[in-house]
Amino acid sequence: MTNYDYLIVGAGLFGAVFAHEAKKAGKSCLVIDKRNHKGGNIFCEEVDGIHVHKYGAHIFHTDNKEVWNYVNSFVEFNRYTNSPVAYHNGKLYNLPFNMNTFYQLWGVTTPTEAKAKIEEQRAEYAHITQPANLEEQALTLCGKDIYERLIKGYTEKQWGRKATELPAFIIRRLPFRFTFDNNYFNDAYQGIPIGGYNALTDALLDGIEVRLNTDFFKEKAELGHVANKILFTGCIDEFFGYRCGHLEYRSLRFEEKRLDIENFQGNAVINYTGTDVPYTRVIEHKHFEYGKQPHTVVTYEYPDSFAPGKEPYYPVNDSKNNSVYEEYRKLARQHAANTLFGGRLAQYTYSDMDDTVASALELFKKENS
Ligand code: FAD
Ligand code: UDP
């Protein structure tokens, strides 16, 4: 017996936006999630008044005015601007690569001096005309100093492979900024929801039935028939019983500490770009929201291999995995009459939150056109 217009598998951002639009259009929805909370990877846990980003630091940034207005219609955003700092061998460097970084690296004080220095650094690798791997690509783009201090260690830790064994395409472009501007993003709009990301999720899912601790695959016999249509936002290879093979991911492990000090590192995000420590980032959550608490919470982020039971964080979009995904996409098209697929896991893509919102809005529009 069908009770709902839509069964939405996954209470993450994609599922929540789709459910909200469906409800607004008069459709009935049941949202399920196998986790014990809503929000998917944007979920925050409140620890002594601090919103802790449980699945990695999330900063909302976008150039898409429609998406920005959309999320702001649910929750107000603060003026947080992401300006991570990189730690390497006892020294700190501003990111992204800008005049502050060039001054810290070489003591250059003008854009002309900085450009000349980068050209000099690149010239050493002018003989590499067709970079065969990430290391060669980075050296030809920015030279030895930036590569060795700010890229090599971080990238090798992040992907668990030597830079000489990573494909060049990962860093086809390395943006240099010849101004003293530490804003990590170029987008027009940026911020953190006031009250944390759960305020956004709760507003999107307001008045919609949500069942937590409910795994679609464990209750498929019943759930497969409760709605006219299913929107699936989980792993696409799992949906099809891995019949075209397993898609590869890179995972992360988070180590959280509550400290009885007011300010641990003076910034929300510090990247550790050397191989002297195994983690890539340390997040101090209170700084996303200008917290004034006498205590603090920090999270050490360790890249990790992926295996069943671990969280699939980063898709490995190399040609092998992309062609496996293509097979699943063909299968998904054959199911289009009663099952929709959306979100980062079902589309096997690394999409930021703004793209996720845009893509959920687009899917709903398409459904109703
Ligand atoms: P998810 O949030 O993963 O939601 C999918 C949900 O489906 C999950 O809750 C899962 O439990 C549920 N599910 C899966 N399978 C089943 C099943 N069988 N039964 C029931 N439920 C199921 N974006 C930015 O814009 N800025 C950032 O700073 C940023 N930082 C990031 C940092 C990290 C470490 C990562 C990994 C991502 C980051 N992102 C960032 C991207 C952002 O997390 C995504 O755009 C967004 O969360 C995707 O939402 P989603 O709904 O597609 O997926
Ligand atoms: N990166 C790097 N040094 C840094 C930060 C990033 O070399 O300090 C590289 C690394 O290869 C990483 C990629 O840039 O995988 C993308 O990093 P970004 O911070 O944009 O992505 P995120 O992991 O936050 O999605």
Image (cartoon, rainbow, N blue to C red):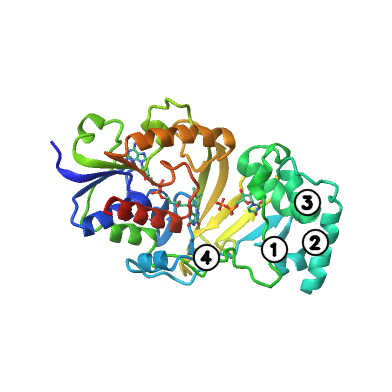
Give the position of the N terminus as an image quadrant: top left
Q: Position of residue 135 (x, y in %)?
A: 74, 44
Check disc 3: other Cα within 10 Å, few if <14, some if 14-19, many if 20+.
many
Q: Earlier in the sequence, mark 4 or mark 3?
A: 3
Residue sitting at the far front: 369
The total of numbered circles placed on residues is 4
Provide the residue designation for mark 3.
140
Does the residue at mark 1 contact the one at mark 2 (Cβ under 8 Å)?
A: yes
Q: Earlier in the sequence, mark 1 or mark 2?
A: 2
Provide the residue designation for mark 4.
262
Mark-to-mark CA distance, 1 and 2: 10 Å
Q: Which residue type does callout 3 highlight?
A: Thr
Give the position of the C terminus as an image quadrant: bottom left
Provide the residue designation for mark 2.
118
Label number found at residue 96: none
Query: Looking at the image, is 133 positioned above or below residue 292?
Result: above
- Between tags 4 and 2, which lies in front? 2
Q: Position of residue 128 (x, y in %)?
A: 82, 46
Asked whether residue 148 is in view, the answer is no
